[in-house]
Image (tube, helix red, strand yellow):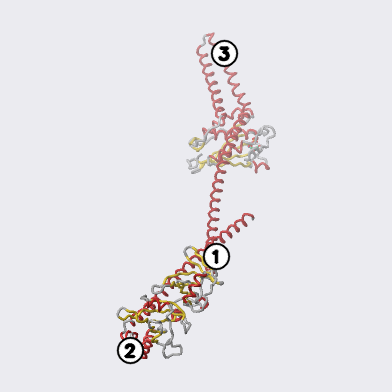
Amino acid sequence: MYSFSKKIISIGILLILILVVTFWLGRAHDVGQAALQAKRQVTQLNNYIDTELARFSAIPQLLTHNESLVNFLNGEQQHYSAINNYLADIQQASGASDVFVLDPQGAVAASSNWQTDYSFLGSNFAFRPYFKRAFAGETVAYFALGMRSEERGIYFSQAVYKQSQAIGVVVLKVNVNKFENDRKLLNTSQGSHFYLQLADEIIAMSDVEQWRLNSFTQLDITARRDIKSRRAYLDHQPKYIKQFQFSNEGITHFKIDKSLYVTAAMPLRYFNATMHVLVDISKINAAQVPRLFWAFFIYSLLIIIGYSLLTRFAGYKKLLYSRHSLELEVIERTQALEKVQSALVQSAKLATIGQLSAGINHEINQPLSAINTYLASAKRLLGKGNISALDESLTVIAGLVERVHKIVGQLKHFSKPSDMQLRPYPLAGLLNNALMISSAQLKQDNIHVDPPSFNENIIVWVDALKFEQVLVNLITNASQAMSNAAVRNLSFQVESFEERVKLSILDSGSGIEQHAFGNLFEPFYSTKSSNGLGLGLSISKQIIDSFNGCLSAHNRVEGGAEFIISLSNKQEGKHD
Ligand code: ADP
């Protein structure tokens, strides 16, 4: 539970981190786009205004070469109404606000607006820099407020010469609100603003009315004094407009009131001023919401897919690991069982030897006493020189020694554990060996053995020693079961099938006790109070199983028990 909620918290934190990163990346992208837009717009705006200014600035220059105008200023032509009309035509055709001519004293000699209420005729603009500087030989483009109209305008002026002598000045005035209005024709978005800032930091033009003729810079006293003396803005006092500008990753940000903009600036070519375009990014944070929504959706999906893949992978790894450890456990247990089994086999052998020891004792003692007797008689015969009788005695002794040798030889096999090897053996030979080992016991218990009578060619695939051990065990059990029986008969039957051989060991004993049937082949199950280990049948069954055979038992109808061994008479694949 704890680790589950920990996982949820980690995934939540990861998701939040991803969303924060997405937000900042998205925002940075949008700010970059806005900055590009500002740059594009300022270039577009400047191109437009520069083209217009270039057009207007050419007009005074052309007029200075007009012969009638030169003559008029030179006092040679007195029909000033013709000049006035000419200037009015020029004004009309060019789209300028006013076109007028000043005499060397700065008095208006002719003007395009001569017939209007605000006619300049009779005015003197000698103090205006556009007169002074032009008369001195400069080509002037000068921003100022109109004396009468009080409208903002750019004054283009140039001196008129007669034989290299300045005889007057031609002035063309363009109202700047013309550009402010024309600017609407430019493809700029609602959120954008612009302002044209003069060299003295005053805003000459802007689409925002409150900014016009004011400044984003706090002017010091010298600057203010200079502005006052020039009277460019007449009596207007430029106000400082509070704003905050900062640069972030090379992009200038502009904060005014509650709005935030990115800006781009570019100087005009034909006028000493810099154009600034502002693109609104106030709503840029809110614009990230749909992006965050999608990011949340996609990242959640990715996390869920990734998590489920990881879980599956971990589960698969766990499965592999548990399968591996299960296999190891099976191997370990099998090895342990094999050890136990071989120990059991060994114990069973010892138990069998124990059971047989009395009989063997008798079996060996008997030939030894006989050997003793024959040796004594041999000595006597040797003394008498009866060589032929001596030879007979020695032959008997040799036979007796051979018998002892055989018995001991058989027992030797029981004393050490042996590896199993399945080989083909004649069944008759194996049974005879077992009977020989058990013969002392059988004799002692007064058992009558029906000599096995079956085909000597019947073959079984067994490990001879182990199989004989099984037979000895079954014969011993049969012998013990008949100890109190009136008739003590042990017999064998063999049936041979195509691939299998069935050997039955039949006795005429007490038969298997009814309650013993379920446990007969269980280790340590014995009904014998004193001398039973209860290992014989369980080991015998395991041995027969290892030959791919089968050991079973039932009671005979005529009394006694029958133990059946079924074996293969062909070599089979599974031999350990
Ligand atoms: P043990 O002989 O030490 O008791 P076994 O595993 O050889 O152990 O035999 C288990 C039990 O099976 C015996 O105690 C006995 O009750 C029964 N049994 C085995 N062989 C016979 C038989 N031929 N007749 C009757 N009962 C038998």
Is label 1 or label 3 in front? 1
Which residue lies under the disc numbered 3? Answer: 377
> Mark 1: which secondary structure?
helix
In terms of sequence position, does the residue under pointer 2 or pointer 1 come before the other? 2
Q: Position of residue 213 (x, y in %)?
A: 50, 76
Tag of residue 365:
none
Q: CA distance from mark 2 to mark 3?
A: 192 Å
Q: Relative to residue 90, is residue 502 depicted above or below?
A: above
Q: Is residue 442 above or below residue 39?
A: above
Answer with left or right where residue 470 lies relative to residue 187: right
Q: CA distance from mark 1 to mark 3?
A: 116 Å
569 relative to 62 in the view: left or right = right
Given residues 154 and 178, the one toward you in this image is 154
Tag 3 secondary structure: helix
- The residue where tag 1 is placed is 296
Provide the residue designation for mark 2. Answer: 77
What type is the residue that disc 2 sits on? Gln
Residue 445, visible in the rendered structure: yes
Check the image and name the residue furthest to the right: 529
- The answer to which of marks 1 and 3 sits earlier in the sequence is 1
Where residue 379 sits in the image (x, y, percent)? Answer: 55, 11
Instruction: Name the residue nearer the viewer: 103 or 44.
Output: 103
Is residue 208 rendered to the left or right of residue 271?
A: right
Instruction: Give x and y (percent) for residue 28.
Output: 49, 65
Q: Residue at x 61, y 38 (%)?
A: 537
Secondary structure beneath label 2: loop
